[in-house]
Image: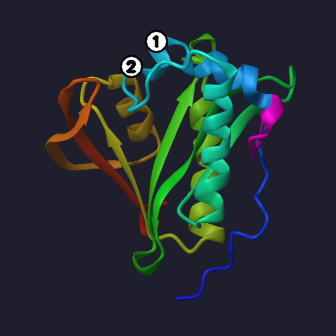
Amino acid sequence: MHTQFEFTVFPQLETERFILRKGIMDDGQDILRLYSNENVVKYLPLPLFASVEDAIDEINWYEKIFKEQKGLRWVIEEIQTNKVIGTCGYLNYEKEHNRIEIGYDLNPDYWGKGVMQEALSSIIHFAFTSMGINKIEAKIEPENTASIRLLEKLNFSQEGLLRQHEFEKGRYVDLAIFSLLKSEF
């Protein structure tokens, strides 16, 4: 199956309130602010960021997964303030199966304001229409109820539970697996 998107130019997307774009070095302070917040990294396999260097490493990782055609990670820039308030994107792109895994995080000052639903709706549309994706997966710790509610609003269905699936921050964690099929979009 031919996909239109070829990982040559990073796609910029725009919603009513946000620009979803490639992360750049100038975003370092905003990325540091995001990932140095304990509430943001609570359910992520990331340590708390302690320096701008940690943020630059993260931005370089976004570039790396794009170059390797394994994923895309957008920064979410608020149009009104030009501040980066979160990130969202894809990882573990399996081209032969037209399957990809979604991930996202947001500055807690913006929680509960429909930001992530707006941003994810845009990247989900992109995956199904421009990348030829058939299935988008999400793996969420069951205690992360806000994230599960978001996925349900976006019509994802829970497929099951991966018990003690990852070892993170000194403990094994279960991951609930959700998915959205192109035919359900």
Q: Residues within 10 Å of mark 1 (few under 14, many from 20)?
A: few
Q: Quarter-wise, where is residue 110 in the image? A: top right
Q: Residues within 10 Å of mark 2 (few under 14, many from 20)?
A: some
Asked if residue 10 is positioned above or below residue 168 in the image, the reply reads below
Report the residue marked by disc 2: 42
Q: Are marks 1 and 2 in contact (CB under 8 Å)?
A: yes
Residue 130 seen anywhere in this rendered image of the structure: yes
Please state which amino acid type lies under the numbered disc 2.
Answer: Lys
Q: Residue 68, percent across and down? A: 59, 65
- Label 1 residue SS: helix
Task: Give the extent of the magenta segment.
Answer: 18-26
Residue at 63% across, 69% down = 129
Q: Quarter-wise, where is residue 64 in the image? A: bottom right
Residue furthest bottom as drawn: 1
Residue at 35% across, 33% down = 148
Left or right: where 5 falls relative to 159:
right
User: For this rendering, which residue is in front, 53 or 16?
Assistant: 53
- Identify the image's colour scheme: rainbow, by chain, secondary structure or one colour: rainbow
Q: Which label was assigned to residue 3? A: none
Left or right: where 102 falls relative to 148:
right
Report the residue marked by disc 1: 38
